[in-house]
Image: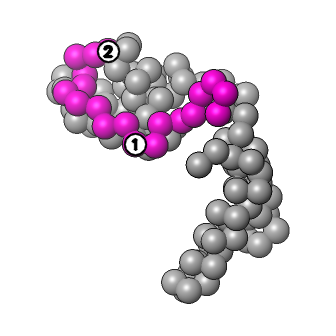
Amino acid sequence: MPYDYLWPKLADDLLKLLDQAAPGQAVHAAGPSMGSATLLYAALRDPERFRTLTLMVPPTAWETREHQGESYRASADLVEKQGSAPSSASARTCFLHRLWRTARRSGCPR
């Protein structure tokens, strides 16, 4: 895995961004998935920078991690074969249903 995508590096990047965007201020922060873990690492490094954390769809860990990885790979394969989500609402809905079915076939827990 590239160094730029390790949690401690992402947390450092976030803290540097906060130094520029909100110097010396405690912020309310929210992050989905990878952003949740990044916020946790950043808050451990500098707890005074955060007034609140909102963790949305935190990344999986332990026994569910392997299944989630299978879902991500299946989704990536579908996007490679079908292209990205179409622009019309009905076509986008069909694309998302195919994506969901692919994830279900990969054995991911609900």
Location of residue 78 by image quarter:
bottom right
Q: Do labels 2 and 1 touch, CB within 8 Å?
A: no
Which residue corresponds to mark 1? 56
- Taking depth in this image into account, of 89 and 50 the one nearest to the observer is 89
SS of the residue under disc 1: strand
Q: Which residues are magenta?
A: 46-64
Which labelled disc corresponds to residue 46? 2
Give the residue at x 40% y 42%. 56
Q: Is residue 68 left or right of residue 32?
A: right
- Taking depth in this image into account, of 59 and 86 the one nearest to the observer is 59
Whether residue 95 is visible here, answered yes or no, is yes
The amino acid sitting under disc 2 is: Asp
Give the residue at x 67% y 41%. 68
Whether residue 51 is in magenta: the answer is: yes
Instruction: Determine crowd level at label 1: few under 14, some 14-19, many 20+ residues with C-alpha closer than 10 A.
Output: some
Whether residue 50 is in magenta: the answer is: yes
How far apart are labels 2 and 1 at the CA level? 20 Å
SS of the residue under disc 2: loop
